[in-house]
Every structure is written in C-alpha cells, then in structure tokens.
Image (cartoon, helix red, strand yellow):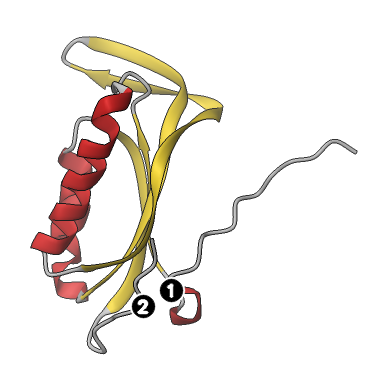
Amino acid sequence: MVNTDTNENSNVYEVGYLLAPTLPEDEVADTESALHEQITAAGGSIVAHETPEMRELSYEIEIKDESGTQAFDHGQFGWVQFSLNSVDLDDVESAFIKDDEVIRHLLVTVDPENAGKQPEVAVETEE
C-alpha cells in the first residue's frame, strides 16, 4: 500500500520489525493493525507498508522473558513507512518495544525522495 500524502511539518520514518514465529498466522494481521493504530494514534500517517511474512534469519535470536529463554531462527518480517512530527516519535517507538510479539525492530528516518518506495533487500547469491 502506498499513500503519498505527508504533512510538510513531519518527517518520514520506517520501522522494520520482526514478529515472533510462534505468533499464529491468523493473528499476524491483527498485530500489524495494532501497530499501525499506534502510529496513527500518535498523529502519524501511514505512507507504505508490507505485511509481515515468515523468513529465515541470518542468525539465531535469543529472547529472555519470565518463562525463560527462547531461540528463534525464523521470524515474520514486515515494515511500515509513516509520516510523523518528530516530537511524537517516542510514542511510536514505545509501541514497538511494549508489544510482546515484536522480537526486534529498527526505526530509521527515510530520505524524502524514497518515501513510499519499498526498501531494497540485500540478497546473497552464489558465484
């Protein structure tokens, strides 16, 4: 999905995130929607996104919680670009941190020329 409407007082950001592979497939869309709602509740506007899909990870990720340690070698990767005033960015970051299904995320500022474009994914090839 691409929406090119942005507020001139806002910046465009992108969050790449990894959902736990243990999240049932029928709950992925609900989790994605909840994260998008947190962005709009903070005053943001979704510019583009990709629904999370299962991917093999380059390395194993260990997550520690009250039930012990879990190791994941797969995860459901998705991303969302959004426009938002920078003063409200902490609310969005907090939403990704607090969501128990998000095992990793990375928030970056997007160059305005690349807003709405799908991020490039590096793919290794055998020579």
Residue count near mark 2 (Cα–Cα under 10 Å), binned few <14, some 14–19, many ≥20: some
Q: Residue extending furthest left?
A: 41
Considering the numbered disc 2 on the image, is that residue within a helix, a strand or a loop?
loop
Residue drawn at point x = 27 percent, y = 38 percent = 29
Q: Which residue is mark 2?
A: 4
**Residue 118 placement (x, y as % from top left):** 51, 61
Residue count near mark 1 (Cα–Cα under 10 Å), binned few <14, some 14–19, many ≥20: many
The answer to which quarter of the image holds residue 64 is: top left
Please name which of the two marks, 1 or 2, marks the residue nearer to the observer: 2
Q: Is residue 87 left or right of residue 77?
A: left
Q: Amino acid at mark 2?
A: Thr
Question: Of the residues under marks 1 and 2, which one precedes in the sequence?
Answer: 2
The residue lying toward the viewer, choosing from 82 and 2, is 2
Q: Which residue is mark 1?
A: 115
Residue drawn at point x = 16 percent, y = 48 percent = 95
**Is 53 located above or below residue 51 in the figure?**
above
**Residue 127 placement (x, y as % from top left):** 90, 38
**Is 99 located above or below residue 85 in the figure?**
above
Q: Amino acid at mark 1?
A: Ala
Location of the N terminus (image quadrant):
bottom left
User: Real-space Cα distance between discs 1 and 2?
Assistant: 8 Å
**Is 12 located above or below residue 106 in the figure?**
below
Residue drawn at point x = 21 percent, y = 74 percent = 86
**Residue 96 placement (x, y as % from top left):** 22, 45
Residue drawn at point x = 43 percent, y = 28 percent = 75
Circles 1, 2 touching at the beta carbon (< 8 Å):
yes
The answer to which quarter of the image holds residue 10 is: bottom left
Q: Is residue 22 left or right of residue 122?
A: left
Q: Which mark is residue 26?
A: none
Q: Residue extending furthest top?
A: 67
Considering the numbered disc 1 on the image, is that residue within a helix, a strand or a loop?
loop
